[in-house]
Amino acid sequence: MNKEISSIIKNLQRVNGGQPWYGRPVYELLEEVRPDKVFVKPGNDGHSMIELLYHMVTWTEFCLRRVQGVKDEDPDEVEKLDWRKIDPSLHSWEKGLAAFKSANNQIIELLSMKSDDFLKEIVDYREFNFRFMLNGLIQHHIYHIGQIAYIEKFLI
């Protein structure tokens, strides 16, 4: 029985689309963001909601590739995508949200086929194990959805 993998999957599902302890789930909050406000930078130099969303996409996709076992990627290229320059002709709220959901769903699907032993393995390009990375991903989602929710309320 894979209790720990099951727990991580349930926590990721709860945070993203279920009933998390802290309040409303990530997907619900992201789906309510008004697209006409996503490019606004609070205080003119803070991160916009769309920058935060694509930052979340970057690290969720990084985690997905690690779980998939993709090893032919340059880790420096991932770092370049972090806090990327947002181009409104390429980056829309809808595309970012779809990419974020897709990566999370793929992680859940792949994890459902793994054993708890997988969580002890060291993540390639890093010095920590999958347990730490996956729990960190959940925490990362919570941290940044809090920022997005605050900015959304600030811009009303």
Image: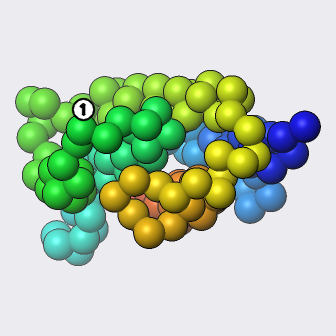
Q: Quadrant of the N terminus?
A: top right
In this rendering, would 58 be left or right of 28? Answer: left
Q: Disc 1 marks which residue?
A: 92
User: How busy is the neighbourhood of tag 1: few (under 14 within 10 Å), some, or many (20 plus)?
Assistant: some
Q: Secondary structure at mark 1?
A: loop
Q: Residue at x 39, y 63 (%)?
A: 126
Classify 100 as above or below 129. Answer: above
Three-letter amino acid code at the position of disc 1: Ser
In this rendering, would 49 be left or right of 25? Answer: left
Q: Residue at x 62, y 25 (%)?
A: 109
In this rendering, would 99 be left or right of 108? Answer: left
Report the front residue among 131 and 56. 131
Q: Residue at x 31, y 41 (%)?
A: 71
| Residue sitting at the far right | 1
* Residue 99: percent from left, percent from top: 38, 30
Question: Does the rendering let one see residue 36?
Answer: no
* Residue 21: percent from left, percent from top: 80, 58
Classify 149 as above or below 108. Answer: below
Residue 107: quadrant of the picture: top right
Residue 46: quadrant of the picture: bottom left
Classify 47 as above or below 35. Answer: below
* Residue 86: percent from left, percent from top: 14, 46
Report the front residue among 94 and 80. 80
Q: Residue at x 87, y 45 (%)?
A: 3
Report the front residue among 83 and 44. 83
* Residue 4: percent from left, percent from top: 80, 50
Classify 17 as above or below 141. Answer: above
